[in-house]
Structure formats: C-alpha cells, structure tokens
Amino acid sequence: MSAITRRSFLTTAASGLAAGALARVACAAEGQTSDQMLDQLMRENQENGLGSGFDNSSRNVRLPKKSLPTLSPSTAETTQTSIAQYEAIVAKGGWPNVPASATGLRVGARGPAVPSLRTRLSIAGDLELNSGEAQVFDSYVDAAVRRFQVRHGLHADGLVNEAALHALNVPAEQRLAQLRTNAGRLKALTGNLGNRIVVANIPAAQIEAIENGVAVTRHIAVAGKPDRPSPDVRSKITQINFNPFWTVPVSIIRKDLIPKMQAEPDYLTKNHIRIYDPKNNELQPSQIDWYSTEAVNYKFKQDAGDFNSLGSMKINFPSPDGVYMHDTPSKNLFGEDFRFASSGCMRVQNVRELVYWILAETPGWSKAEIDEVIKSGERKDAKVAKPLPLYWVYVTAWATPDGVVQFRDDIYGRDGVS
C-alpha cells in the first residue's frame, strides 16, 4: 500500500477511537513511545480491573524490553535468526487475511471475523493458542492486538482500526522478505558503533540514546515526507543551539513559503519571519514579487521564540544534506501513527531529555543550567565536549534478543518488496 493511502486511512482511523477505559488508554498514549504505552496499558488494567489484564492474559507471549536498542550487534544476530521463524510460517501457508468486518471490534464483541483475527495473531506469536473462546474478542485478544500494534509502531488501543487491519494483512512472504533485507542492513551498520551513540530509525520515526548497548531513552520523532525523505546519516553531534533562530532553506522557500505568501500575504508577519537581502538589509514582504522566483534570492529568518519552527533547541552535526534534529511547537504531530511530515530534518519529542543526555559529559551544562538558558530565551550555543556518534538508519524490520520481531512500513519504498 502506498504511503499516501496509508496516511488517508490513518486519518480516518483517528476518528474511530472507542469510549470508556480503552479510550482513556488511547488518550494517555498520545505522544508516548511504545514502551510508555505498554507501561500505561498495564497500569490501566491493574487499576481498573479490565479482565485478566494486559500483563498476564498471555503469560508466555513476550513484551518488548525497554532496554534493547534497534541498532546493535545482538539485534543484527537475532534479526538474522528470526528469518527461520518466518520461513517456517511461510512454509505452512502464512496467515489468513483478517476480513474488513473485524474493523471496530473491541472487548466483548462476537462475530465471524474473530476466529480469523485469533489465528492471525497466534501464528505471529501475539496470542497463545487455545486462549479464550474462539468466537469472542476477549481480554486475551485485546492484549494480543495491543502487542501487535506496539510491534508495528501503531497506537496500542486494542482496536482493529484500518491501520491495524492493513498491518495484519501484510502477507507473511512480505514480512519474510523485509527481515532478509534488513538483516543485511543491520549487519552492515553494527560495526564499531561506539559506547555512547544516538540512533534515529527513519521508518520507525523513533530516536534512541544508547549507552554501552542499552537504550537509555527513546523519543518519538517526525521524519521527512515521502517526497522529501530524511537521508541516511553517519556523523557526530557537535553542538546544541538554545533558543535558535531559523533560517529557511531555499527548498522550503520555493516549495512552501512562496505558495503560502501567494495565498496569505501576511503569512511571514504572523510567523515572525524577516526578509534580508544579500547585504543584510531587512525588506518588507510587499517589496517582493511573490509570483516570480525572486524570493529565493533572499534570506528568510524566523525570530527565536515558542513559535519558532525549531522550538527551543536544535541539535547540530555535519551533514552534506544540511539536516539536523530539533524541537518543535507542533507537539500534536507526535501523537500520530503517520509521522512523516518534515522536509528531511527530524523533530524530536521530549528533546530536552535527549539534550540532557548529550551534554551529560560537557562541563557547564548541567540540567539546571540547561533549564535556565531555555527559560531565559537567550540565544546560546553549547559545544559538545565529546562529539557523539549519530546514525540515521533505514530499518523496517528487526528482532531484539528477547525474541520480539518488529516491523514498520517501507515509507520510502527502499525495501524492494511489495
């Protein structure tokens, strides 16, 4: 399925969240990482008595472990090992399609689609065989659907919405091909990584801070649009900008800013963006012909502030593509399943926590000092004392040493499978 089609049904699915306890879980999960969703789900079940509970309804089905990173030598090995598991699934005929009538099913529902859903979840290891009644969407199925959603980067609300249905009905042969492709990628990527590294997995729209092989913190990200993809990166984080200005790239001037000014002449003023000529003289928007390419000859600079497109922090590293990681005022984007909305850079949820970690070994930049400079609104830069290795990678399938296999959409069409 194309990225555009996926985006459309994700948008539709957002309107179909259930009410009651499950909806509260979904709302609580907005903007959370998969690990945080799991924690929240277990707490909700324990506190509200939702049946046998997410944490114990399938005692032999493993949950993802928080500490296991996407990029590591052990992950490369277990991804390779998981290929045999999926070869066996394919050899036995794969899994059944889940009918569209399963859409919207939730705990307590009965129907002819439930057995197919149960079989699909059991074959992939999300549901224990012979758990519960075959025709009933019970707490076992609810827990299994949520596990499945977490493994596929979807909001774990336990509802079979259109996004979940799409992921459920990706053929086993395609998942096997993804594992084979990504096992090779991981093997090539995991040599001499370093003890303290930052990894951004583009298809997962997720960033990990990894120390001594342990994922110490994870962050939801917003990556590049399919037509403006985030590039692969191997670099080192060298600097943090606090309360930064934003200089609009020429590509965004051409593709976005000029059309916006044609439709909304006060757009620049409302967004605190100033215009400068090559001699650094400030110009007024009325001095530019917005129906020509004249605007690309000028510099557009957005003032610092909570409205700034970079938010309060920007993470810099050498890149031939001119990309970087940054905060954003548009926090709502982190709550979406489809998080590919940037022009190539990465927006980072809870970026302050990541910056704390990056600067932990840099004198003069304690948490308190970082908080103070952000609060002041003053433009300041911090040079990272020990530049940190940074990797932006394209991994759509991986298996961590706990045996949990995860998949993401091939958002840029680079896997060569369909």
Image (cartoon, rainbow, N blue to C red):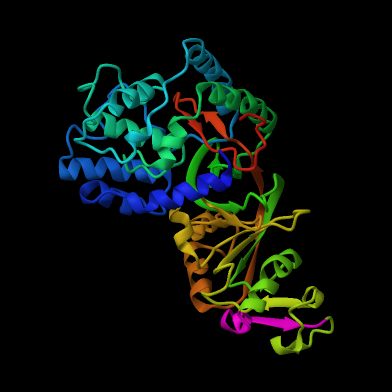
Q: Quadrant of residue 288?
A: bottom right
Q: Is residue 271 left or right of residue 127?
A: right
Magenta region, residue range: 264-277
Q: Quadrant of residue 42?
A: top left
Location of the N terminus (image quadrant): top right
Residue 389 is situated, as x and y percent measured from the top left of the image, at 67, 46
Viewer-closest of 152 and 113:
113
Tell me, yes or no, whether the highlighted magenta stretch contains residue 274. Answer: yes
Q: Is residue 23 left or right of residue 266?
A: left
Q: Quadrant of residue 251?
A: bottom right
Q: Is residue 175 left or right of residue 45?
A: right
Residue 192, above or below 205: above
Residue 64, above or below 32: above
At horizontal 51% and vertical 33% (from top left) the residue drawn is 407
Tell me, yes or no, whether the highlighted magenta stretch contains residue 102. Answer: no
Residue 9, above or below 311: above
Residue 245 is situated, as x and y percent measured from the top left of the image, at 64, 74
Viewer-closest of 360 and 221:
221
Residue 240 is situated, as x and y percent measured from the top left of the image, at 63, 63
